[in-house]
Image (cartoon, rainbow, N blue to C red):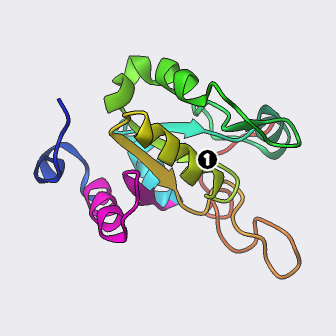
Amino acid sequence: TPMNISDLNFVFPAALAQAHATAQAQGLTYAGGVSPDVAWDLVSTGQAVLVDVRTAEERKFVGHVPASLHVPWATGTSLTRNPRFVRELEAKLAPHGGKNAIALLLCRSGKRSVLAAEAAAAAGFQHVFNVLEGFEGEIDAQQQRGHTDGWRLKGLPWVQD
């Protein structure tokens, strides 16, 4: 059964209840966004599942979070939209509660994961959150990522092939 906001404080960690309240106040169509630090805390304590929505190439050459699930929002260097995203997400989250799983979506900078979270919410996923800043963070004045924010800059766990 779908939960309402009054249930959140008893079911969700406080950080997700706060993110959800903020998302509602902002009129977002998905559950909300959390910082990389909060995301790692939730994932490392088993309270949420991390889903990397970047391409296989990005995961291989830039790095990825150990034990994260992978469901690409787009594929290849041209970032062609993955038409099977919602079905693949549901399949990967099935062991974790399916459409009721608490899933945190991670991309490069936190933008593609918003699109993925919106699509997931539209398909009936109840608790899909965006990881703000993404894996590499925003582009800085030198047109480089990884110097201002993001998962890696914060020193959170990641590996590279």
Whether residue 85 is in magenta: the answer is no
Q: Quadrant of residue 34?
A: bottom left
Residue 29 pos. (x, y %): 40, 54
Whether residue 25 is in magenta: the answer is yes
Q: Amino acid at mark 1?
A: Pro
Pointer 1: residues within 10 angstroms few (<14), some, or many (20+)?
few
Q: Residue at x 43, y 49 (%)?
A: 129
- Tell me the element at label 1: loop
User: In the rendered image, which quarter contains the C terminus?
Assistant: top right
The vertical placement of 95 against 24, above or below, is: above
Residue 8 pos. (x, y %): 18, 49
Q: Nearer the viewer, residue 161 or 98?
A: 98
Q: Is residue 37 left or right of residue 88?
A: left
Read off the magenta span: 15-35
Q: Residue at x 51, y 21 (%)?
A: 92
Residue placed under numbered mark 1 in the picture: 157
Residue furthest to the bottom: 141
User: In the rendered image, which quarter contains the N terminus?
Assistant: top left
